Every structure is written in structure tokens, then in C-alpha cells.
Amino acid sequence: MLLAPLLLTAVAAFAEDGDVIARRRIPSSPEALYAAALDLGAHPTYWPAGCVSDWEPGSVRSGPGASARLVYHAGPWRRRLVATIAKAEAPRRIEVDHPGRKGFVTTWSFTPADTGTDVELRTWILAPPKPFRKAYFSKVRPAWEACHAGALQGLEQAVRAAPQP
């Protein structure tokens, strides 16, 4: 019986090993933020300069199945991937899949709060093995976290600028 709590703690620590996480409380409704994040075609305007480039939207721009081909930049790291909205649970969560051998999954989560919505942008990723691990934690992840934080700020600015119904 004592093993179960230890095992759960180890699994939780492993699950967040290399994750890139940014959180922000935004004074908007979950519905407005969800709708804005669901539009993959608008995402290049959310990300800070230098974080993404070569954004090429797919034939579907918004909602499940929307895709774009792009290059992510985080410190010394560059990765060209396809991003596809794989799941959307209105107005709580959007899952963006980046398939492939070097791919990952990014989630946008929206939780109602007293003064707006708590938004979490998380990329679920295992840290690389040695010898790349140290560079990942000292250069790549901090730069990627700054990009995630900037994307949340960009999302907030876009929602504030949008006409209100």
C-alpha cells in the first residue's frame, strides 16, 4: 500500500520532466479565449517575434482538423513541424498535435476564475537524454517558456481587441 503514493508521485514528476508551461489569468470569458485559440490561422499573431516563423496554414483554418506548417524557435533549437488541432472540448481545452518522431502535444486549457479565466499553455515533452539535457534545461526550455508566456499575452491582446457581441 505504501508503494502506490510513491509510484503516483514518481509518475507525476516524470510527466512534467521536460514540459514547457505558461499560465496567465486573463480578464475574459473562457468562451472568448477558447474561440480565439481555436482559430489556428490567427496563432501567428499571438506568438512573440522570433518564436515561430514560416507559418503556412492548411486548408482548414479553425477547429478540429485545422493545421499549419511552421518552424518553432526556442534558444538554439529550431524545429519544422505540422501543427494540427486534434481535439477541442468547448470551452475548456484544445489539444494541438505535432506528430512525428520529434513531435509533441501542446494543450490550451481554460478554467473560469473570479476575475476572468486561468489559461494554461503546456507542451507535453520529455527532456532529451544526455548530452543534450543540460542545454535543454538551461537554454531551450527557458526560451520556449518565454514564447509560451508571450503567446498567452498575445491571446489576451487579441481577445481584448476583438469586437464584443
Image (cartoon, helix red, strand yellow):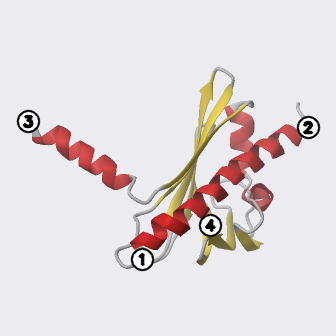
Residues at marks 2 and 1, CA–CA distance in whole angstroms: 46 Å
Residue bearing the label numbered 4:
83
4 relative to 40 in the view: left or right: left
Quadrant of the image occupied by residue 67 = bottom right
Check disc 1 and report the residue beneath it.
132
Q: Mark number for residue 1?
A: 3
Mark 1 crowd level (few <14, some 14–19, many ≥20, 10 Å Cα): few
N-terminal of the pair, mark 3 or mark 4, is: 3
Between the residue at mark 4 and the residue at mark 2, the CA separation in whole angstroms equals 27 Å
**Residue position marked by numbered label 2 in the rendering:** 163
The outermost residue toward the right is: 163
Secondary structure at badge 2 equals loop
Image location of residue 50, percent across then percent down: 74, 69
- Placement of the N terminus among the 4 image quadrants: top left
Measured from the top left, where is residue 110 in percent x and y?
A: 60, 37
The type of residue carrying mark 3 is Met
Q: Quick check: 131 above or below 27?
A: below
Give the quarter of the figure containing the C terminus: top right
Q: Position of residue 135 (x, y in %)?
A: 47, 72
How far is the residue under mark 2 from the one under mark 3? 56 Å
Of the numbered discs 2 and 3, the one sitting upstream in the chain is 3
Which amino acid type corresponds to the residue marked 1 in the rendered image? Phe
Amino acid identity at mark 2 = Pro
Q: Which callout, 3 or 1, points at the residue further toward the start of the chain?
A: 3
Q: Which mark sits nearer the N-terminus, 4 or 2?
A: 4
Circle 3 — which element? loop
Q: As displayed, is residue 23 above or below residue 143? A: above
Q: Nearer the viewer, mark 3 or mark 1?
A: 1
